[in-house]
Image: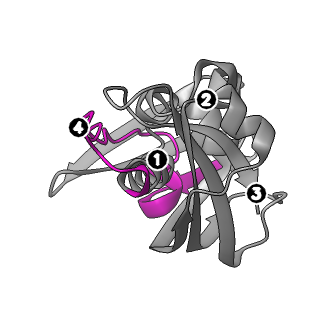
Amino acid sequence: MRKVIAVGGVALATVSVLLGWKAVAGGAFAAGLRQHVALPPVSASPEQVVLTYLAAADAHDTDTMQALLTPSNHGAMTPSPSSVWDRILGNDESWPGNVRSIRDIRISWSRNDCPAEEQAAKGSCVDVGTEFSFSAYRSSTIEPGLVPWGFWVVRDNVNDRWLIDEVGQG
């Protein structure tokens, strides 16, 4: 049995679990409910693309996250299992599903010095460094706390949107 109560625009839920009742509210409930983060304009800078991607990760908006990745990286956004209730109960093993929060995001650097093979594969490549406070629902390869993280952001020509081609430089 599930009981959902709306309070001031925020949904609170109580979920019946085999061993008793488990109240899920606030940040934990946010893991199951996605909030939409708007895509930046096509003219957005690499830094704006990275900031939007991290905001989308915090909001569990995998559609926006995926739209900001090169096609070869789309598999990283596939939640498993995909049920909202599985994610609420902590059964989502995907990277976005495990994010409790990403806060205090700042750009540490932005430079045109991607590795030669990355630069050769795309028309332009910018290495964007960030730092943010991270917390997860379960043990993660990313340690909780202040995290330095880099992204390679690429595009084929000046009229294309910048897309994230590498998200794993921690």
Secondary structure state at the residue bearing disc 1: helix
* Residue at x-position 67% and y-position 49%: 98
- At label 2, which amino acid type do we have? Lys
Inspect this view and state whether residue 107 appears. yes
Q: CA distance from mark 1 to mark 2?
A: 20 Å
Q: CA distance from mark 4 to mark 3?
A: 25 Å
Classify 47 as above or below 31: below
Q: Position of residue 137 (x, y in %)?
A: 69, 58
Can residue 39 be found in the magenta stretch? yes
Magenta region, residue range: 21-47
Quick one: which residue is furthest to the left in this view?
Answer: 8
Task: Give the mark nearest the N terminus, 1 or 4.
Answer: 4
Task: Give the mark nearest the N terminus, 4 or 2.
Answer: 4
Of 90 and 35, nearer the camera is 35
Give the image quarter of residue 169. bottom right
Q: Which label is found at residue 41? A: 4
In the picture, measured across the screen, residue 112 lies left or right of residue 19, that is: left
Pair 4/2: label in front: 2
In the picture, measured across the screen, residue 123 lies left or right of residue 79, that is: left
Task: Give the mark nearest the N terminus, 4 or 3.
Answer: 4
Of 126 and 35, nearer the camera is 126
Q: Which residue is mark 3?
A: 169
Secondary structure state at the residue bearing disc 4: loop
Q: Which residue is mark 1?
A: 53
In the picture, measured across the screen, residue 110 lies left or right of residue 139, that is: left
Please say if the residues under marks 2 and 3 sit with CB atoms less than 8 Å apart: no
